[in-house]
Image (cartoon, grey):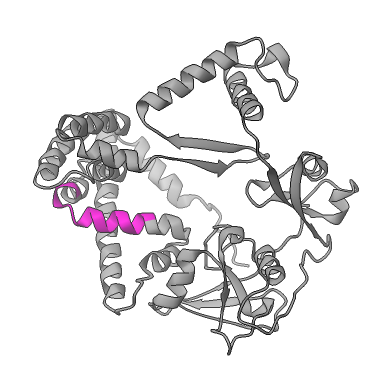
Amino acid sequence: MPELPEDPFATVSAALADAQALGDQDLVDALTDAAHAIRALQATQAALITEVDARIRALGYRMSGTAETVAVTLAMSPRSAEHLTDLSVELCSRPVVWTGLAEGRIDATKAQRILVELREVPDPRREHLELLALDYATDHTPHQLRRYLLGLTCDHDPDATLRKKALDNRGVSITARGHGMADIAGYVSAEVAEAFMQALETLADSPDCADPYGQGDQRSKDQRRADALAGFLTTHCTYQITVDVIIPADTLIGDNDYGAASKRLGPLTSELARSLCFSPDARWRRLVTDPLTGRLVDMNATTYRIPERIRNAVKARDLTCRFPGCHRRAEYADCDHIIPWPTGKTRATDLAGMCRHHHRVKTHSAWKVTHDPTTSSHDLTWTSPLGTIHRTTAHNYHRRD
């Protein structure tokens, strides 16, 4: 192990000393210069990523694999890399916005705001609005800029084209949070959102407001609104609850309190996991793991069509998409032959869970994958279009203790 220098923070100390030596105005000027330099580098990064994208697309594959290459190069998730790649390419296609970033007039957050909010506006109107937005953004916050851009798009949408496109994007999504909680987000028309909040306020203020956790009058306004929503669903909707719970055998029977999780919501407390497992109101599929090995049992088949029992075993083994850095749940992914059938057999050791996007990347881009079917960890070796090597293994179900 290399020895640490006597002062491991010598560089930081020197930088702080330089800052302390500056007068007030010089300090503010230096901070401004640093921000401008960072923004210029962000513009340069966008240009570099755009060139990476151009070179990989020039290989001529049906899918580029650029986002995946950026992901493994910068050690970020494929989804974040895809977002960064798309943003970089779009930024380099909008000279007004890119120049504003390169000159330090705006930062990457403001550049993204301008790109996103004006994306549906056709040229030359879009370039005109970009110039207006760039001038406004120089001395306003991202939040203020967003409100300004929304005003611009409403004022410059005489035939309501942007409004119609926005309506087409309406939807509801769920995002897992810690401790068995989740966020529910809805992208809906403004009048629907207003009606929803007014109705929820009425239910929350009612003396008959649902109280699923028995907290009574101690609840905050936000808690009452959340309980009112749950009560409304219970009263007015008929539905079946399917709970996929992963739990070590000793935690299930109460000998330990570690390692429980839900495929949808992530880690769970043992108390909540056992409650879900034994609830008479829920249909659930239990995945009990060995507390010592954390492994699931393999199964075999001799046909191309993947039997449901093997499909379930592969998805439970992998838990997430097996592409490097991807966290999409294997539960909703494809069960893919690593080696095309019939060369590759229809058995769990020759199959891998892959989200539809990365399944297509494997098939239609310059990304390649190989595996060693003899390893218990089911290792996959991925080679990027630029020749870098990356490895993934099956999910380890060892509990958190």
Tell which of 276 and 100 is nearer to you.
Answer: 276
Looking at the rendering, which quadrant does residue 246 occupy?
A: bottom right
Whether residue 159 is visible: yes
Q: Which residue is drawn at 65% across and 26% down?
A: 235
- Compared with 295, 172 (above or below) is above
Q: Residue 373 placed where, x, y %?
A: 66, 83
- Say if the magenta span includes residue 85: yes
Q: In which quarter of the image is the N terminus?
A: bottom right
- On screen, residue 285 versus residue 52, left or right, reads right
The residue range painted magenta reads 83-97
Looking at the rendering, which quadrant does residue 298 occupy?
A: bottom right
Q: Residue 109 placed where, x, y %?
A: 32, 42
Q: Residue at x 52, y 62 (%)?
A: 325
- On screen, residue 317 versus residue 34, left or right, reads right
The main secondary structure of the magenta stretch is helix
Q: Residue 257 placed where, x, y %?
A: 83, 45
- Say if the magenta span includes residue 75: no
- On screen, residue 219 versus residue 85, left or right, reads right
Tell which of 212 and 145 is nearer to you.
Answer: 212
Q: Residue 110 placed where, x, y %?
A: 28, 40
Q: How many marks?
A: 0
Q: Residue at x 37, y 54 (%)?
A: 83
Looking at the rendering, which quadrant does residue 214 occupy?
A: top right
- Compared with 344, 78 (above or below) is above
